[in-house]
Amino acid sequence: MGNLTHDEIQALAEHCEKAELQAYEITKITDDYPQMTYEDAFDIQWEARRRKEARGTKIVGMKMGLTSWAKMAQMGVEQPCYGYLADYFSVPDGGDIRMDELIHPKIEAEIAFVTKAPLKGPGVHIGDVLRATDFIVPAVEVIDSRYKDFKFDLKSVIADNSSSTRFITGGCMASLDEVDLKTLGVVMEINGEVVATGAGAAVLGHPAASVAMLANMLGERGEEIPAGTFIMTGGITAAISVKRGDAISVRYQGLGTVSARFV
């Protein structure tokens, strides 16, 4: 159940979204609203999403966050979270990402799924996801918490659209029978230097488990994953900070490279 009023949810959605659009830091909102519940946090996220759509912004996909056991332990949270991807978050492979639109960005290597059938929780499992998947494609997520010093709790980060800000897709698409997602390796480089490596199993044991969890979390709100949805499944690598001038390149075993520059 939620503890916040409709007006509080609207005000907090505006507060978090303004910080995202104008790239300034805020303090975590549970400091001022300690009574806030997880339901309130998702209400704030969905309200900000509604505000964007009302202005003509298109929602182009979904993302899962905090999907590695290590990251959950590090952040002291007990479950992953999700966010939505807006059209202006998308950066073409090899494109430029403007630092003056961001606060303190970090990058993560991810595997994205594109669905060909709807998935509706509860009770969605990996098998359902594999059957509903059209193809996978490499993606790099740029996360940028609006909270000061990247410090937050799970409720605050959910309200802040799970730190979503930009994403780059590239490389090659593949069907699920062409790759072993658990062992699929990635190597992240910044300015030609390897800064992180990982394999698909870092994402809840199998990236499809992340999609199943998303379907089940959305199901709690009566929402579903429609056919044709682009879903980033969460970081295979640690989140690595970037600065102006950095050229990033992520190699995906058998699936090519995704690159971008921070300018």
Image (cartoon, rainbow, N blue to C red):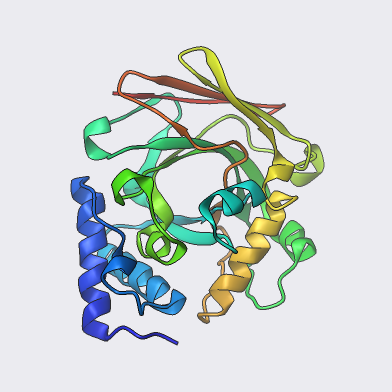
Residue 170 lies, in percent from the top left, at 53, 32
Residue 5 lies, in percent from the top left, at 27, 86
Residue 133 lies, in percent from the top left, at 69, 55
Residue 41 in sight? yes
Q: Is residue 5 left or right of residue 84?
A: left
Q: Is residue 90 above or below residue 66?
A: above
Query: Number of callouts in the render?
Result: 0
Query: Which quadrant would residue 136 be assigned to in this image?
Result: top right
Q: Is residue 183 above or below residue 121?
A: above
In front of the other: 255 or 102? 102
In front of the other: 152 or 7? 152
Query: Which quadrant would residue 177 be assigned to in this image?
Result: top right
Residue 105 lies, in percent from the top left, at 36, 37
The residue lying at 57 percent from left, 60 percent from top is 80
| Quadrant showing the C terminus | top left
The residue lying at 30 percent from left, 66 percent from top is 31
The residue lying at 34 percent from left, 74 percent from top is 34
